[in-house]
Image: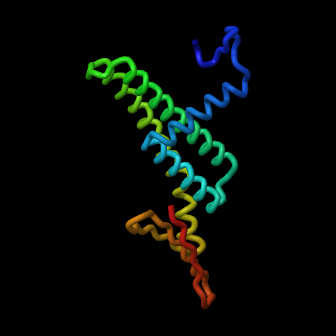
Amino acid sequence: MEKNRNENNRKNPLNKSFGYAFEGIRTGIRKERNMKIHCLAVIAVTVAGTFLHIKPVEWCICLLLFGLILSLELVNTALEAVVDLVTKEKKPLAKIAKDTAAGAVLVSAIAAAIIGCIIFVPYFFEIIKKKRKWVFFFRNTKSLSLLYISQPPRQAENSYAVFSF
């Protein structure tokens, strides 16, 4: 029997359909390494956008890209699961299906990274150029950190903040 039908062959209530969808998202995040990486990227972009005060239209672009990448990753995961369900042996068509789905995610991730650079690089240049503030990236053993040091003219004390992600 279908998952979205009850014993009377009627569709399940809308809340059950949403429950199945959220369970799929949870499963994707829990079990897929690339989905975790994309979620971390969403968090990093959100922090950077908040910190840099990007414009509402830029937020809309970021949100569209978040949805695109995460949705494609979920579709890729679903397609891989179906292929694995159909065949356990290595078949050329199964490889084509998996590789092209992964390629679709990669193409959209590259496009999102380019668009992200178009949005965020001017803000970083503005910080460096106009406000005499420096941004340093350094890598320690556990995380990538962003050190923000502010040295405004005619001020004796330096102020700084460290953001780790």
Residue at 53%, 47% (x, y): give it: 39
Q: Is residue 156 above or below residue 98?
A: below
Can residue 110 be seen by looking at this rendering? no
Percent across and percent down for residue 95 are: 31, 24
Horizontal arrangement in the rendering, residue 86 relative to residue 31 (left or right) = left
User: What is the x, y in percent for residue 114?
Assistant: 47, 46
* Residue at the extreme front: 7
Say which residue appears at 31% left-offset and 18% top-offset: 93
Q: How many marks?
A: 0
Choose top left, top right, bottom left or bottom right for residue 141.
bottom left
Camera-side residue: 93 or 84?
84
What sort of colour scheme is used for the picture?
rainbow
**Residue drawn at 53 percent across, 70 percent down:** 128
* Front residue of 139 and 116: 139
Q: In this image, 139 relative to 133: left or right?
A: left
Residue 8 % position (x, y): 70, 8
Q: Nearer the viewer, residue 161 or 33?
A: 33
Q: Is residue 164 left or right of residue 6?
A: left
Q: Is residue 125 above or below residue 92?
A: below
- Would you identify the image quadrant in which residue 9 lies? top right
Residue at image coords 52%, 57%: 121
Q: With respect to residue 63, does 76 lie above or below?
A: above
Which image quarter is the N terminus in?
Answer: top right
Q: Looking at this rendering, what residue extends furthest in the top direction? A: 9
Observer-nearest residue: 16 or 48?
16
Q: Quadrant of residue 94?
A: top left
Could one spot residue 58 in this view of the protein? yes
